[in-house]
Image: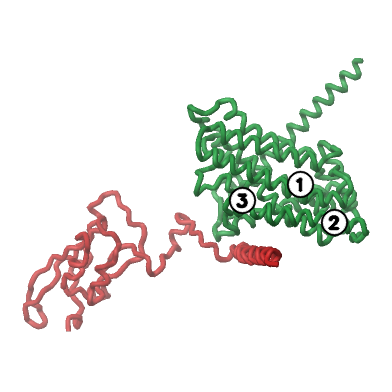
Chain colours: A green, B red
Amino acid sequence: MILSINIVENDIFNMLLIAAIYLGIFSVAGLFLVLLERKVAAWFQLRLGPNRVGPWGLLQTMADALKLVSKELTGTIKADKFLYNLAPYFVIISSLMALAVFPFTQEFQAFDINIGIFFLIAISSIGVIGILLGGWASNNKFALIGAMRSGVQTISYELSVGLSLVTMVLLTGTLQLSEIIEVQKSGWLIVQGHIPAIIAFMIYMIAGTAETNRAPFDMVEAESELGAGFHTEYSGMKFAYFFLAEFINMFIIAAIGTTVFFGGWLSPFGITESIPWLGIFWFLGKTFALVFLMMWFRWTFPRLRVDQLLTLEWKYLLPLNLLNIVLMALIVWLGLTIQI
Amino acid sequence: MSYFGDIYKGIKTLLTGMSVTGKVFLNNKNNSITQQYPDNRETLKMFNRFRGEVVMPHNEKNEHTCTGCQKCEIACPNGSIEIIWDRQIDPESGKKKKMIDKHIYHLGMCTMCGLCIEACPTDAILWAQNYENSVYDRTKLTKVLNQPGSKIMPGVED
């Protein structure tokens, strides 16, 4: 009896420890993603970017975060106080929860759930509830329009993200992320699945960029039309939660892409197979390559209109995705996959 | 089948745009346009068309080319230029002639429109490319453009 209580306590302690480590690492990582975004934006626009705080401006976003923590939390009088305060936590918690299931190396995985992909898709749609709450509760027309657009966008593009991942699940035959990576020991899925996998990857990247509400799909924030969209009325740390969640979501989308299409922590051609802990560098390297791709999108393409956004999803991405699933099913059935 | 044609065209144009920005990204180290201003004060040089303030160039013999025709004063929309002139006897020819005493320029009022410089028939006044023009005392913004003891360059009026 005593023993079992000990085990339970130990488990809870371990869970709390892991949660604290993850929170610490990823809030700092989110800050550095913000810095990366600003640097990449500067390089795309022939500028230098932040270079004053710390060496090469490395501490710029830390200083920004400290400033945001010390700021007053203002709000509107007519706001629905409870929902208004709840919204940022919804957004940040849902994006941090998704991080738990990623296998960073063979051993470094907090929560190896057997419905990993499904869990990720489900969690990533919870974040939109936070955005809708925030827009609704702030009692501001710009925030409401931004939140409604976010609802439209996420409901539409959720389908494409899900279906493009389902296309790859046809190939792996499992939803568990560690198993998906096991399957890729005989070739990354984008090689195994060749043509339909490449189409699925393109659709996934487009829909994933839309999922995270980033340019060219940032109708939700649309600075030129809506002020700041759903977080117009937020200040201080509550605003920082929305901001951090956006960047962690970008990391999550890139990490799912890495895990499902590019072999996760597996090294190309197994060159560092004998040193398993190097996997985390491969994982992060591939993830940041995809993050860079999304930043490249952002600093190249102009923002879409709402009707163009819906046309792209319902007329092009969704039918192509359905066709692509049939194609992938045929290829798996006929055994035409490329195995290295 | 314009449907697939549209998809092909869409992907092609997106890739074209990405290649343009990608090239800029790769080449940015050599020609970043940012000037880190207070750090590069010694080496920073303004481009030729920059309008800092109106100056009157003098040659090494302390001679300018202003005839005192007052066209700049008339052209100035808000009276930033005042010319104090007098008829004096020219020591060389012995004839009475119009000569400037002071060419006064109010930098504090100037809108940098450049009409005076366009109006000048002898190119006596030009744009300077200096940019640190702020002062603590506004009387310092009233400048006398001709140097003391300067005279007109011979041959300008012919």
Note whether residue A53 is visible. Answer: yes
Q: Position of residue A160 (x, y in %)?
A: 73, 50
Q: Residue under label 3, please give it.
A: A217
Q: CA distance from mark 3 to mark 1?
A: 18 Å
Q: CA distance from mark 2 to mark 3?
A: 28 Å
Of A123 and B67, nearer the camera is: A123
Q: Amino acid at mark 1?
A: Gly
- Quadrant for the C terminus of chain A, please: bottom right
Q: Position of residue B73 (x, y in %)?
A: 18, 66
Of B153 and A301, nearer the camera is: A301
Q: Residue under label 2, please give it.
A: A328
Q: Which element type, helix, strand or loop, lies under badge 2? A: helix
Q: Chain of mark 3?
A: A
Q: Residue under label 1, please give it.
A: A162
Q: Quick one: label 3 or label 1, which is nearer the N terminus?
A: 1
Tell me which residue sits at (87%, 20%) in the image: A6
Q: Amino acid at mark 2?
A: Met
